[in-house]
Amino acid sequence: MANKIAVLGSINIDTTYRVNEFPKPGQTIQALSKSSTGGGKGNNQAVAAARSEAQTYFIGMVGTDDEGKFMLENLAEEGINTDLISQNKEIGTGTALVTLNSAGQNDIMVYGGANQAMTTEVLTGSEAVLAQVDFLLAQNETPQEVTLAAFKLAKSLGVTTIFNPAPAGKIMPALLEYTDIIIPNETECQALTGSEITDEASMQAAANAFKEMGVGTLLITLGSKGVYYSTPSSQGLVPAFKVQALDTTAAGDTFIGALASQLSKDLSNIVPALTYAQKASSLAVQKMGAASSIPSAEEIKTALTR
């Protein structure tokens, strides 16, 4: 049975322009196509968890604009509980502009909007939800003060906290002290530890650095090289599935949401859960879009048996 998950995070409308090559400074180019869909790391991780059959709750904020209404409806259609999503009358819903080239690489510009306007007031009434979930997920696209307050509340209720420090940036030391599992990529890991990730020894050194900061479990997503894990009792490298990537936009978010849906709180199934999450991510990068590319549990399980 999948877990119960709460996600504290960002909700955006993503507009994607497909191009052959990224424009150079000052250059005007023609886009091959344009599309808009739901996005934001919080939204994507929640959708990934829900599609992997986790009972999912969302804590966040949108505007009272059409984009906000669209996103509330979108999340509800995914079976995600939206009761704890606030609406801001003065600041619009977050937006992201994605440029995607023919090699499947992307550049992203994000306007935080209502996501950045969140205060600890969004946690009002969340205790009843947090008291029944297994994991609380958060990212670095919403104010860290809110995440810290949420993690403190979650920990007091016995909930395992998962922090995805993306996009890379300075993190409050207190926030890491209340983080059980941290999931950075190589760049984010180096930004937080000061050490370049080059091999398994440097990954374990990073894990030791995070332990000193108060984080017991480190998962480093390594793209096509897989994921490195270090828990209090084990460590290792789980390889990625080799596929031809079409769009990597929500690969990391798909991985995290799928992982949270399957992972045991005692981490006893860490390798099978990571394998499941890797397969979910490998399926997502073969489709266009962010949330629209995230696979269902049935698709993931079927792919794993091939």
Image (tube, rainbow, N blue to C red):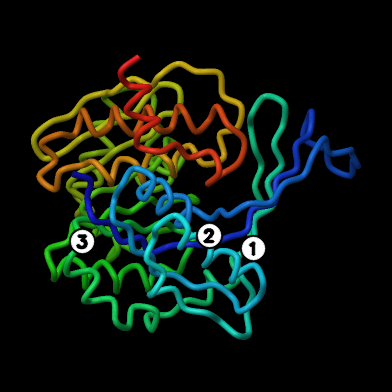
Which residue is label 2 attached to?
74
Q: Secondary structure at mark 1?
A: strand
Disc 1 crowd, CA 10 A, few/some/many (<14, 14-19, 20+): some
Residue placed at 28% from the left, 76% from the top?
A: 126
The quarter in which the N terminus is drawn is top left
Which residue is label 1 attached to?
111
Measured from the top left, where is residue 252 in percent x and y? 44, 40
Measured from the top left, where is residue 111 in percent x and y? 64, 63
Disc 2 crowd, CA 10 A, few/some/many (<14, 14-19, 20+): some
Separation of marks 3 and 2 at Cα, in angstroms: 22 Å
Which residue is label 3 attached to?
133
Q: Is residue 189 above or below residue 280?
A: below
User: Are dots 1 and 3 in contact, CB under 8 Å?
Assistant: no
As drawn, is 248 to the left or to the right of 100? left
As drawn, is 71 to the left or to the right of 161? right
Callout 2 amino acid: Asn
